[in-house]
């Protein structure tokens, strides 16, 4: 049956690239507007016109380069900064000396800051510091001597670019941490699902072989002993969570993959039909007169949790113990209660069993209901039996996260 894969791509820095793209266009038009307004102060206007034409064409042609970190290469950054530096150094040849002494803007004006910010977003604060230092030197050369306005503008660009570069580095680190946490969560849920499958099948078979072998004796006893050793080893692996976590995060973005339900598994399933096979001489099933419809995965998981509860009854209360299943179809939730007349569970036994790797209640019952957004309440009085109440809200009953099970 085909599966559908959903990929979540996270990139906290992508808005910065979009903002930089808009900034470059607006500041290029602003620089050209300043040149038009001050055309009378140009000693050689053809130099300014030629530079503004190159600046505008370069800004428009490099749209794809500032669309994201993947396209913004080092070669582009160097070429972009070179365009800004050439504009700064050409200013004394294009404008009058009076304009320079009055503190007039350079040919690229504040467009230069966009080139420095590209370094900050791409490489962090260190790259920003290097680029802003080079721009500062070019401005000092253009002015001929440091002035208050020049120092003020240079420091402003330097501090802003270094600050943005530092924020980008912190954001990337946070993004990697979040991606890692999502990966661990996805793998943990998959491990819990596998642990439930193992408990419902392999571990119970091994335990049965161990018990039967001890009763039969001879070669069967040796086989039972080996089965018991394998059961203990498998429980250790399941409870210890020795499952490797794949690394899928990247510096520029993190990819987290989860597998959803099959496309054709959408028709509601009658929960009572799934519980009917449990009814027998020692198990009574009480259900509403109408079908209890749930999403397929939710119905299967709830039925499997009921099966795990009945397995615990047979295992701990004996084959002759009686059990009752009550299905209640409420408007906002479905409640299934499993009650038995066994000896009950001693206080502290559940925590001890979980520590020993016996996950019947922790994973096969509570784990399933937790994944469905529901709850599993267990009440046991020694000598008076045990009652397990499984509740699944209708509004939240859905497929468990991770890979859907086939049963």
Image (spheres, rainbow, N blue to C red):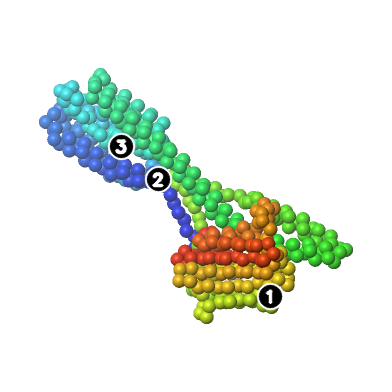
Where residue 311 sits, quadrant-wise, is: bottom right
| Residue located beneath label 3 in the image | 114
Q: Is residue 388 left or right of residue 70?
A: right
**Residue shown at the point (38%, 35%) measured from the top left:** 165
| Residue located beneath label 2 in the image | 12
**Residue shown at the point (77%, 60%) measured from the top left:** 227
Where residue 84 sits, quadrant-wise, is: top left
Residue 306 image offset from top left, x and y in percent: 61, 68
> Which quadrant is the N terminus positioned in?
bottom right
Q: Is residue 198 left or right of residue 168?
A: right
Residue 217 image offset from top left, x and y in percent: 86, 64
**Viewer-side residue, 331 vs 104:** 331
Task: Give the alpha-carbon distance from disc 2 to disc 3, as whole Å.
Answer: 19 Å
Task: Give the alpha-carbon distance from disc 3 to disc 1, as whole Å.
Answer: 78 Å
Task: Give the alpha-carbon distance from disc 1 to disc 2, as whole Å.
Answer: 59 Å
Indicate which disc, 1 or 2, sits on the residue closer to the N terminus. Answer: 2
Mark 2 burial class by Cα count in 10 Å: few <14, some 14-19, many 20+: few
| Residue located beneath label 1 in the image | 282
């Amino acid at each position: 049956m085909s599966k559908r894969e959903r990929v979540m791509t996270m990139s906290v820095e992508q808005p910065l690239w979009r903002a930089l793209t808009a900034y470059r266009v607006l500041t290029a038009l602003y620089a050209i507007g300043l040149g038009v307004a001050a055309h009378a102060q140009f000693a050689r206007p053809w130099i300014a016109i030629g530079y503004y034409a190159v600046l505008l064409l370069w800004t428009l042609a490099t749209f794809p380069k500032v669309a994201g970190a993947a396209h913004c290469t080092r070669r582009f950054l160097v070429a972009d900064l070179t365009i800004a530096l050439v504009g700064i150094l050409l200013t004394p040849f294009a404008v009058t000396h009076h304009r320079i002494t009055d503190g007039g803007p350079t040919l690229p004006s504040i467009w230069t800051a966009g080139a420095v910010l590209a370094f900050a977003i791409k490489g962090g604060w260190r790259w920003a510091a290097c680029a802003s230092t080079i721009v500062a030197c070019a401005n000092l050369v253009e002015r001929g001597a440091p002035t208050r306005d020049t120092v003020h503008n240079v420091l402003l660009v330097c501090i802003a670019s270094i600050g943005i570069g530092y924020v980008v580095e912190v954001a990337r680190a946070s993004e990697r941490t979040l991606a890692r946490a999502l990966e661990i969560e996805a793998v943990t849920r998959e491990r819990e699902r596998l642990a439930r499958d193992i408990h419902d099948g392999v571990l119970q078979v091994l335990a049965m072989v161990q018990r039967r072998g001890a009763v039969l004796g001879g070669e069967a006893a040796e086989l039972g002993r080996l089965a018991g050793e394998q059961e203990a080893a498998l429980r250790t692996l399941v409870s210890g969570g020795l499952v490797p976590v794949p690394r899928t995060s990247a510096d520029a973005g993190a990819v987290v993959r989860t597998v959803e339900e099959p496309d054709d598994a959408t028709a509601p399933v009658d929960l009572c039909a799934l519980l009917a096979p449990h009814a027998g001489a020692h198990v009574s099933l009480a259900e509403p007169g109408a079908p209890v419809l749930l999403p397929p995965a939710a119905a299967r998981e709830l039925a499997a949790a009921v099966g795990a509860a009945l397995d615990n009854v047979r295992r701990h209360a004996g084959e002759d113990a009686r059990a009752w299943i009550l299905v209640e179809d409420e408007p906002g939730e479905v409640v299934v209660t499993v009650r038995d007349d066994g000896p009950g569970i001693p206080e502290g036994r559940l925590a001890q069993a979980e520590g020993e790797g016996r996950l019947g209640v922790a994973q096969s019952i509570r784990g399933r209901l937790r994944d469905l957004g529901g709850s599993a309440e267990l009440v046991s009085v020694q000598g008076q039996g045990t009652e397990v109440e499984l509740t699944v809200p209708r509004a939240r009953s859905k497929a468990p996260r991770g890979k859907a099970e086939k049963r």
